[in-house]
Image (cartoon, rainbow, N blue to C red):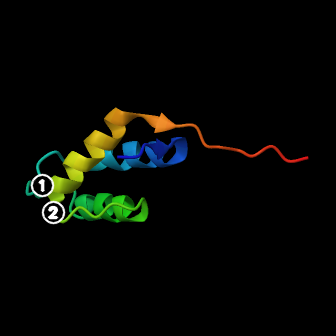
Amino acid sequence: MEKLTRQQSYELEEQFSRTPAEPFSGDHPGEHMKLIALLNRFGHQPMTKQQALNLARTLLDLGWKEEDHPISD
């Protein structure tokens, strides 16, 4: 699994912190869908709320990668 960029990691951490740990808790409706949409934007396709939570935690645990910036002349 490829690491996220620093910006993606920050975005994911922000959304993950707002998403309840229990997928069916009823607290903060829609936050799980926002997490799934963000993961979709990053090229991942979780099929359930629990998969989205697990994937987000895994990606955050991997850390982020430095973005390559080509040197221009």
Label 2 packing within 10 angstroms: few (<14), some (14-19), many (20+):
few
Q: Secondary structure at mark 2?
A: loop
Of marks 1 and 2, the one in the foreground: 2
- In the visual, does 70 lie left or right of 55? right
Query: Which numbered marker is on residue 23?
Result: 1
Q: In the rendered image, which quarter is residue 41 located in?
A: bottom left
Residue at the spot x=61%, y=43% of the render? 67
Whether label 1 touches label 2, CB < 8 Å: yes
| Residue type, numbered disc 1 | Pro
Residue lying at 27% horizontally and 40% vertically, measured from the top left: 58
Residue 27 seen in the current view: no
Please provide percent x and percent y for residue 66.
58, 37
**Residue 4 falls left or right of residue 7:** left
- Look at the picture and state if 54 lies above or below 31: above
Q: What residue is shown at x 33% (from left), y 60% (from top)?
A: 44
Direction from residue 59 to residue 11 in the image, left or right: right
| 24 relative to 56 in the view: left or right | left
**Nearest to the observer: residue 54 or residue 22:** 54
Q: Which residue does the numbered mark 2 point to in the structure image?
A: 48
Q: CA distance from mark 1 to mark 2?
A: 9 Å
SS for callout 1: loop
Expressed as whole percent of the image width and height from the top left, the position of residue 8 reads 48, 49
